[in-house]
Image (spheres, rainbow, N blue to C red):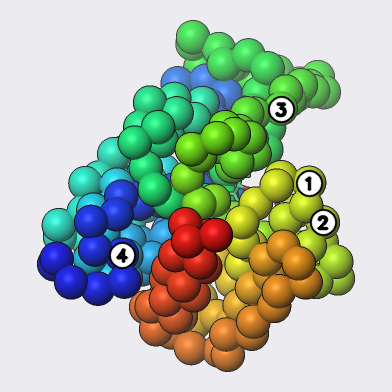
Amino acid sequence: ATAGPLAGRTVLITSGPTREALDPVRYLTNHSSGKMGHALAEAARDAGARVVLVSGPSRLSAPAGVEAVAVESARDMHREVMARVGEMDLFIGAAAVADYRPEQSAGRKIKKSDSDTALRLVPNPDILREVAALGEGRPFTVGFAAETDDLARHARDKLDRKRLDMIAANWVGADRGFHADDNALEVYWPGDGHASLARADKPALARQLIQLIAEHYHARSRG
Ligand code: C5P
């Protein structure tokens, strides 16, 4: 598409979970399905953008017309994002990136024994924070926050701490968030900006969020 609010713009989106290897056959991960990130990629494409989707393992295939980059671990995702983000107008971090990885990934399958064992974890790079910290010429940067409590406070805190242009927060719990087909979003931006996107299926929600992002992106470019 050449028309639409993001015509001629480039958008990089991360999606899905990451997998952090323990050994060749085991890994740590989370329940992210990739539904929201993939829906955002479609919506951004339909808004006229050139879209690159960097996705961890997901059952979903990349939407048509979107450039797909498949990754496994947070460090893979970090590398692929940083290699491309310089040419992007917008960055949307929708992936559920593992905060930690096992300190060591054994080259061979870890053997069972009768004694206790401990797993030492080390922090992964915070991709979103690094992109937002790029400084002059950085893309318009949007993060997600999945919270089980105190949504507004935690989301605003992330917005400030990571110096984002916008954050989309949602409740997660037993039947909400990750695998669900619908969701609701509270969106915040600097200067006490706030919008509520009512419960809808993820494609509809993604279209509304892309609309909101495009408005603010253009307002910033004009400012
Ligand atoms: O601080 P928290 O992990 O809850 O922030 C969530 C946001 O940060 C999401 O947009 C997620 O994609 C991004 N993130 C990231 N790299 C990490 C952890 C989170 O890009 N290592």
Point out the tag, 2 or 3, that comes first from the N-terminus: 3
- Locate residue 120 relative to residue 42 in the image: left or right: right
In the displayed image of the protein, which residue is found farthest to the front?
A: 223
Q: Kindly identify the residue that appears in the image at 67 percent across and 66 percent down.
A: 189
How far apart marks 2 and 3 lie (CA) works out to 20 Å
How far apart marks 4 and 1 lie (CA) works out to 27 Å
For the C terminus, the quadrant is bottom right
Which kind of residue does numbered mark 2 sit on?
Asp
For disc 4, the marked residue is 6
How far apart marks 1 and 2 lie (CA) works out to 6 Å
Tag shown at residue 161? 1
**Disc 2 on helix, strand or loop?**
helix
Tag shown at residue 123? 3
Label 1 residue near ligand 1, CB within 8 Å = no
Point out the tag, 4 or 1, that comes first from the N-terminus: 4
**Disc 1 on helix, strand or loop?**
helix
How far apart marks 3 and 1 lie (CA) works out to 17 Å
Kindly check if marks 1 and 2 are in contact, taking CB atoms under 8 A apart as contact.
yes
**Disc 4 on helix, strand or loop?**
loop
For the N terminus, the quadrant is bottom left
For disc 2, the marked residue is 157
x and y percent of residue 85 in the render?
41, 35
